[in-house]
Image (tube, helix red, strand yellow):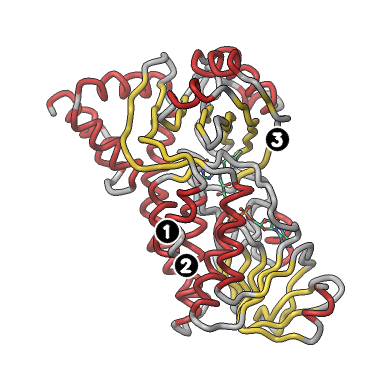
Amino acid sequence: MADYIVRDMRVDALVIGAGPAGSAAAITLAGAGRDVVMVDRAAFPRDKVCGDALIPDALKALARLGLREDVLRCSRVLDGVRVYAPDGQFVDVSGECACIPRLTVDEVLRSAAVKAGARFLPNVDVKGALVDGERVVGADLGASELRADVTLLATGAAAEPLKRFGVCHRIAPSATAARIYVRTDEAFAREARHLCISYDAAICPGYGWIFPGPDATFNVGVGFFYDGKARPQARLSDRKLNTRELLHRFLDTFPPAKDLMSRAIDITELKGAPLRTALCGSALARPGLLVVGEAAGLTYSFSGEGIGKALESGIIAAETVLRGDGAETYAARIRAAFGPRFRGYKLAQDWLARPRLANFLARRARKSPFVRRELSGLFQETSDPRRLFSAAGMLRSFVS
Ligand SMILES: Cc1cc2nc3c(=O)[nH]c(=O)nc-3n(C[C@H](O)[C@H](O)[C@H](O)COP(=O)(O)OP(=O)(O)OC[C@H]3O[C@@H](n4cnc5c(N)ncnc54)[C@H](O)[C@@H]3O)c2cc1C
């Protein structure tokens, strides 16, 4: 089918990858009347190893795409995030959020792109760029070639497509993470109202999570960041990292995880995946090519959240194309939109990777409205992380 459709085809925009970044771009471009082809090496609906959490940035971006309510209808809507410090204290941070399997949300997004007029080709593993001098003018789809005025690379954390398009600056991922799904009885699941994140000393610099999803399911996992500052008590970077071992340690030692597992009716097999974070690891663009979503490192190191950033960058890329602007303008827009936030959140990650500081912060959060306000602002991306994660912020936590 793919051969038949794409032979000798020329389109306004070729979108490679139908995850949140690619679909958001395709929805916006096709909705504005552009001729768009979106391809993916997978057939949809497809699973994507993820924590499945939609934090406020993702909900905002979905609202811009007109899909917020459609997505929330299939999600478990939650009250906020409960953050556990290494010593077991926790703090509840308010902010609207939800949890929905990627199998479902990515299909909602892809279908919306098709409804907006984009043509979707599944099972197409893009082999490389078609170039004219320095400019990318389309892609080699294996059995055929597709020419496009602009190509959007939205291929997620895989390094291979970045290499094939000449934009890879770093092959190694920034982090690795693994998850399982667990089902419990309805009564137990109803009680879980928060995304739960644990900054466990054994996992630093990383974290474990328990995210309550729809139909009494929970997404449980651990992520470990190579980019952070490793703590002496973790020393995990000294030996070969094994996320399976880390996840089992989390399930055996973190009390809410132990409780959950003792109630589990059903447990799926563990699946792992890499992450590309911190707005680095690839060029953001080259003539004729815009790199969007996790391919551009647009996932936070601090929390591993990237769905919202993927959606937002897809929209920015599409708007850049619609205005007739080029690759350099897109790269500048991405740096302006995300640079300060990523620097701030990297700072937060470095602070929370120090178990003593994380414990201290959790203690202060129980007493200080300032700390609670700033943490909620951090979650909702309405406040600057440097206000809290600084010597001045720590001093202020004693007086307000
Ligand atoms: C274990 C784990 C937990 C996470 N938890 C969360 C969370 O709770 N919340 C959150 O916001 N983020 C989370 N993230 C990050 C999140 O998964 C990513 O930020 C997000 O998927 C990025 O979206 P994307 O569209 O850029 O890429 P993807 O969703 O990865 O989509 C890329 C698409 O490109 C396709 N593709 C790749 N190569 C090719 C090729 N050569 N040809 C054609 N198609 C190709 C793939 O099949 C895929 O469909 C987590 C990540 C991991 C690994």
Mark 2 nearby-residue class (10 Å; few <14, some 14–19, many ≥20): many
Cα separation, mark 3 vs mark 2, equals 30 Å
Q: Earlier in the sequence, mark 3 or mark 2?
A: 3
Which amino acid lies under the numbered mark 3 shown in the image of this protein? Lys
Q: Earlier in the sequence, mark 1 or mark 2?
A: 1
Q: Residue at x 44, y 18 (%)?
A: 86
Question: In screen coordinates, is 12 left or right of 314?
Answer: right
Q: Position of residue 366 (x, y in %)?
A: 25, 21
- Using the image as rendered, state which of residue 21 and residue 388 is in the foreground: 21
Q: Earlier in the sequence, mark 1 or mark 3?
A: 1
Between tags 1 and 2, which lies in front? Answer: 1
Furthest-front residue in this view = 186
Which mark, residue 271?
3
Q: Position of residue 373 (x, y in %)?
A: 23, 36
Q: Quadrant of residue 164?
A: bottom right
Q: Is mark 2 within 8 Å of ligand 1?
A: no
- Using the image as rendered, state which of residue 385 and residue 166 is in the foreground: 385
Q: How many marks?
A: 3
Which amino acid lies under the numbered mark 2 shown in the image of this protein? Ile
Furthest-right residue in this view = 143
Question: In screen coordinates, is 170 left or right of 8?
Answer: left
Label 2 sits on residue: 315
Q: Disc 1 on helix, strand or loop?
A: helix
Which mark, residue 61?
1
Mark 1 nearby-residue class (10 Å; few <14, some 14–19, many ≥20): many
Q: Is mark 3 within 8 Å of ligand 1?
A: yes
Q: Is residue 189 above or below residue 101?
A: above
The quadrant in which the N terminus is found is bottom right
Q: Disc 2 on helix, strand or loop?
A: helix
Which amino acid lies under the numbered mark 1 shown in the image of this protein? Ala
Q: Residue at x 48, y 68 (%)?
A: 331
Task: Say if mark 1 contacts mark 2, CB within 8 Å.
Answer: yes
